[in-house]
Amino acid sequence: MISRRLLLASVLLAGLAPQPALAAWRTCPGTTVARPAPLPGGEPMAAPQNTLGCRHGASLTVGDATLWRCQVVPADDGDLPEGTPPYAFLIDRPGQERITLPDDLMAGRFTAFEVITADLDGDGRPERVLAAWNSQGNGLGVNRWTIRVFDADWKLLGTFEDVSDWGNSSLVRAPQGRRGCDVAATAFVDSVNRRGVQGISFRARFHRLAGGRMEIATDRPMRQRRYDRAFERQRTAHFRRGQEERGDPGAWLARAPEVPVVTD
């Protein structure tokens, strides 16, 4: 009996003991976001001449750079040569060689991309984050994005593919003691809850800019939340407010448990 009372007391005291504070999810400050204007009449515009065969799409000017997102069409309207991407980004700058990046796109939504200017490493010089929506899946309707990080001169520093439900809160202020901002690469993953029931969770893994490249932020735990009924209602309400492709990881994971960093 005494041992049972001691066990009960220890459980109660553990519940009353101070719990580790959950680090705040703070959106990256001082950012600017550029997005393409709607296409005139909803029709894609003719792309500049290029060797890839990108014929039409949408453009965006950021500083002295012009970005084109365009569809690759073979000259004879046949099949694309093996290894040729169906879409591409062209980045043109005065006096510089054109940058060409492979792309993927659903339903011809050429304008579903953005360029965010932010100081990721806190050195006072801005980086460019090109976030491009690729598709929306069936079932949960997960929005798939490709995120590319460049320096101010458009040198590629890192790429994140298959990012789920990217949104305005996906760039996060660095944790206390470190300057700059991190990229929250989010994904829906298989998980098992405390009762051993299998399901899915929404996870954010954070990446920082260090030494001129993007790497996992080992000083910042991941966030993970079970996709339960409450989460489903919250996420559905967000998209019903007209957000279309962009999610809100910051709101969805603000109170989510922190989990240890996993390095591959």
Image (cartoon, rainbow, N blue to C red):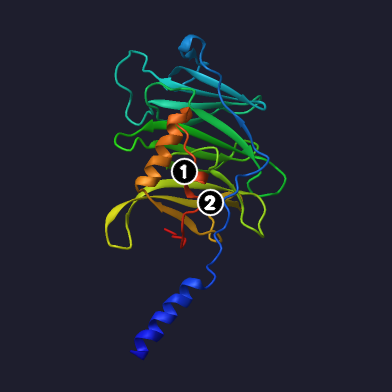
The amino acid at mark 2 is His
Q: Residue at horizontal 52%, vertical 10%? A: 40
Alpha carbons under labels 2 and 1: distance apart: 10 Å
Q: Residue at horizontal 56%, vertical 27%? A: 91
In primary-sequence order, the first of circles 2 and 1 is 1
- Identify whether 48 is placed above or below 97: above
Furthest residue in direction left, as rendered: 197
Observer-nearest of 46 and 180: 180
- Identify whether 195 is placed above or below 187: below
The amino acid at mark 1 is Phe
Quadrant (top left/top right/bottom left/bottom right) for the C terminus: bottom left
Q: Which residue is mark 2?
A: 207
> Which of the 4 quarters of the picture holds residue 2?
bottom left
- Identify whether 84 is placed above or below 124: above
Residue 159 is situated, as x and y percent measured from the top left of the image, at 49, 42
Residue 53 is situated, as x and y percent measured from the top left of the image, at 43, 19
Tell me whether circle 2 and circle 1 mark residues in contact (CB < 8 Å).
yes
- Which element type, helix, strand or loop, lies under badge 2? strand
Per the rendering, the mark at residue 160 is 1
> Which of the 4 quarters of the picture holds residue 104?
top left
